[in-house]
Image: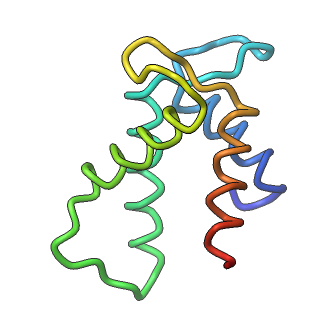
Amino acid sequence: MCKGDVAQKLKFALQVFSSTDTEKDISIDFKELRRLIHFVFRLSLETSTEILLDYDLEQLASIVAKDAFESNGLDILKGKLELKQLIRFVNKVSAHEMR
């Protein structure tokens, strides 16, 4: 998770957190993505001096995961987010933060 570009890190994370077990079909369902995002939030808080008081990380992870699905026109109950869709979402959010 420390080396490589963002796309490589996301691919690895999807392979770890997703129940998909083929190299060609790299996708993740809503619950798996929510768990992945929650893990990233917890990990970032452990390695940062930043403190988020009164913030429910589960709820925040759900909001971000839902946004990722909805921004790609996917149903959170039935859809699966593909790697390229997740990369597009992350790039969109990153571009928005730079403004």
Q: Is residue 66 above or below residue 32?
A: below
Q: Is residue 99 left or right of residue 41?
A: right
Residue visible at 47% across and 76% down in the picture: 47
Question: Residue 2's spot in the image, x, y percent?
Answer: 71, 61
Question: Residue 82's spot in the image, x, y percent?
Answer: 67, 25
Q: Between residue 88 and residue 28, name the one nearer to us.
A: 88
Residue at the extreme left of the image, as rendered: 54
Residue visible at 39% across and 85% down in the picture: 50
Q: Is residue 10 left or right of residue 57?
A: right
Which quarter of the figure is the N terminus placed in?
bottom right
Q: Name the colouring of the figure.
A: rainbow
Which quarter of the figure is the C terminus placed in?
bottom right
Q: Is residue 6 above or below residue 27?
A: below
Q: Between residue 96 and residue 29, name the one nearer to us.
A: 96
Residue visible at 55% across and 19% down in the picture: 80
Question: Residue 95's spot in the image, x, y percent?
Answer: 71, 66
Q: Quadrant of residue 62?
A: top left
Q: Quadrant of residue 12?
A: top right
Residue visible at 49% across and 34% down in the picture: 70
